[in-house]
Image (cartoon, rainbow, N blue to C red):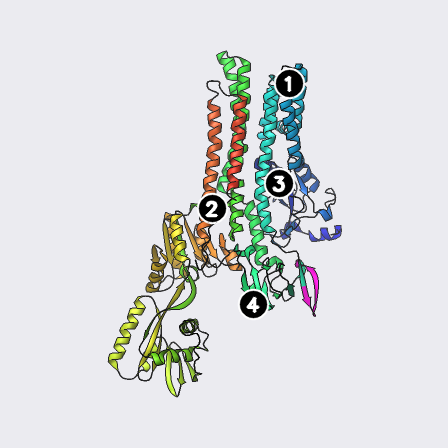
Amino acid sequence: MSKDNHQHSQSSPETSGELIEYRVQGLSCPNCTREMQEEIQKLDHGNNARLSYNSGKLTLSPHVNLSRVETILKSDGARIVYAPQTALSAASAEVQPIHSSHAHGSAQGHDHEHGHDHAHEHSHGGIGSMKWLLSISAVFYLFTFLLEGIVAEPVVIALYAGAMILSGYTTFLRGLRNLTRYKFNMDTLMTVALVGAVIIGEWREATLVAILFGLNELLEGYGMNRARQSMEALLAAAPKEAELWKDGQTQRVPIESLTPGDVVRVRPGEKIPSDGAITQGTGAVNEAAITGESVPVTKREGDAVFGGSVSTDGVLYIAISKAYEDSSLAKIMHLVQEAQDSKTPTELFIDKFAKYYTPAIMIIALAVTLIPPLLLNQPWMTWIYQGLSILIVGCPCSLVLSSPIALVSGMTRAARNGILIKGGVHLEQLGRLEAIAFDKTGTLTKGEPAVYAETVYDETKFYAVVGALEQSSLHPLAKAVMKHLEIKNPQCMFNEPQQITVLPGEGIRAEVGGKLFWVGSEEVLKHVNGQQDHIRAVEDDIRRMKAQGYTIVAAVSEDRVLGQFGLADEIRPETSTVVRKLHEAGITDTVMLTGDHEQSAQAIAKQSGVARVFASLLPEQKVAKIKELSSRKKTGMVGDGINDAPALAAADLGIAMGKGTDSAIETADVVLMQDHLGKLPGAIKTARRVNQIIKWNIGLSLSLKAIALLLTIPGWLTLWIAIISDMGATIIVTLLGLTILLGKDQELKSGY
């Protein structure tokens, strides 16, 4: 991109709401990231800047002085990553951003270069160099430890100092800079602790503090990097090029250049570039990138396909219906990236807590150092040592890591299973649900009628007449009846009816074999002449069917009723298992909300295992019922994302079923990208586990620190105990957060 073009593309960003996004490497901790964001926001035009530790992304106005931004990032050892093909000078602002976004963002410029450099960089230039420096420092430390008492003390001190400098000089420099700015964070704590330990001659402990603090940072980076890489592996589903088919020729083009109406050729093993429909060809398509289900789905001419899906065994010609930036996959990826950047109430609380916690620890350490010697005539060296130990114990590393690794891991696992969660706050809410309300049609049921009962009075004519009159109808009830007849007798052929007439509100009338017949609702019974006893018996049978919630399709001739079918919305095969699994997962109340009549709703509720039913509801009554439920319990609403939008918005958490539909993606807080409920119990279990691990992490971090601090009362706290307490908490918090990525969810697929 030329400089002129780059500047032109960024014109009037303040009025258009345009922002540029860059990838940043080397963010050492959430607290440091927040402080750098605050500094960037103080720059001219920087008030909208966002720096995310979770995703490693920087978003800011193109008018911000990028050189000053780089200086701020460099203060923590972080840097902007330039795309390899455009590694231009930051000073000239000729950089390659990840993407430009307007107001609410766009998915069109998702960075596809993440295969080049994933290393989480810390102050030493990356995980690789950090490992080497820490390894060399550890060898120095062990070598020096063995030499104590053998060589002269100045040599021992020099070796310890060398190991300390190798592993901790960047922490020391950052800490000194923070002290000059009266900023108190974990680097400041460690710097004061290191200087204090050196002053009182505790070289061995000071060196170990430096090495283990470096190891702490390495673990933080590794944990967050693993979570980010798992997320980036999902985002790698985005195709980069497509074979444009035009005038019998193919041409490789970037997917960004495709427009609706273009036809592309997709060969086996290739990714479908954007949403569209097959114009030619048949083959299996793996839609795991959208739905999380790895079993390929057979697609034929006319079938819709999603961008990012993979053709597994056939050459497909696809007419593109959407530009890539408007495709389901692009929207999903953009929402997933946004989800990483959102902060939960827990994270916001920890951020605020850490802001005051660190200065408080320094004050406590100072009080422990000064009060016993000054007021109680205790030895200075003993209490200086205790004060330094408190500084190390008080390091908030494990506390600030309690939430982000677990949240990103949870959202990654959900996305890997085709469950789109639009932010950590929604993941937390999903794990706190106590009640779930379901829409009936299209959610608990397939939204398609099926024959559940039949009463036949004239078997020789009933099926033949119904088949003849319904075979050409496009009405959903007619299709369901024909499907039922095909199952009963697959080889059956029906006569062509004559003089077909549609009767509004009743059904259809036609001649078959020279005789008149009617097929439709129970209203067609009025066309039967005579036989009142027979009619009354039929009406009794129909009343019994309707009491069970069935819709009636009857067939009659001029002189008698031939029979009737009872139809109902077909329940999804997995519904009853899902409802049972939800109860096992801790959902105490399951409710059905539907506009259908009471009998039909009760029939579905009985089959599904839903505890309570509210039928014959208008849309506004559904919203009122959701608000009532939410006032008593944390309530989620599950719907299809189209006609349930008001109820989804009114619930504590809106969960839409969509299989990639735009309306579902836009409407709800959580989207099940499959066309069934099978993965909902697993998603709730994952969310509950995330919440539980965050609580464990916070409790563990604070408990270990509290226990260590209590040891100062009898004077038992040592630097060794402080180091083990701080590092142990960080290791456990990191590993617990990553365990969320392990294991495989049990899938309750449609047809279970």
In the current view of this chain or complex, which residue is farthest to the left?
A: 533
Secondary structure beneath dot 2 equals helix
**Sequence order check, earlier mark of 4 and 2:** 4
**Picture residue at 52% right of the left edge, 37% below the top:** 735
**Sequence order check, earlier mark of 3 and 2:** 3
The one nearer the camera, 541 or 143, is 143
Q: CA distance from mark 2 to mark 1?
A: 51 Å
Dominant secondary structure, magenta: strand
In the current view of this chain or complex, which residue is farthest to the front?
A: 491
Q: Nearer the viewer, mark 2 or mark 1?
A: 1
Residue that mark 1 sits on: 147
Image quadrant holding the C terminus, namely: bottom left
Quarter of the image where one finds residue 512: bottom left
Per the rendered image, the range of residues in magenta is 244-255
Residue that mark 2 sits on: 686
Residue 53 visible (yes or no): no
Count of marks placed on residues: 4
Residue that mark 3 sits on: 41
- Residue 12 horizontal/vertical position (percent): 67, 51
* Looking at the image, residue 295 lies above or below residue 68: below
Secondary structure beneath dot 4 equals loop
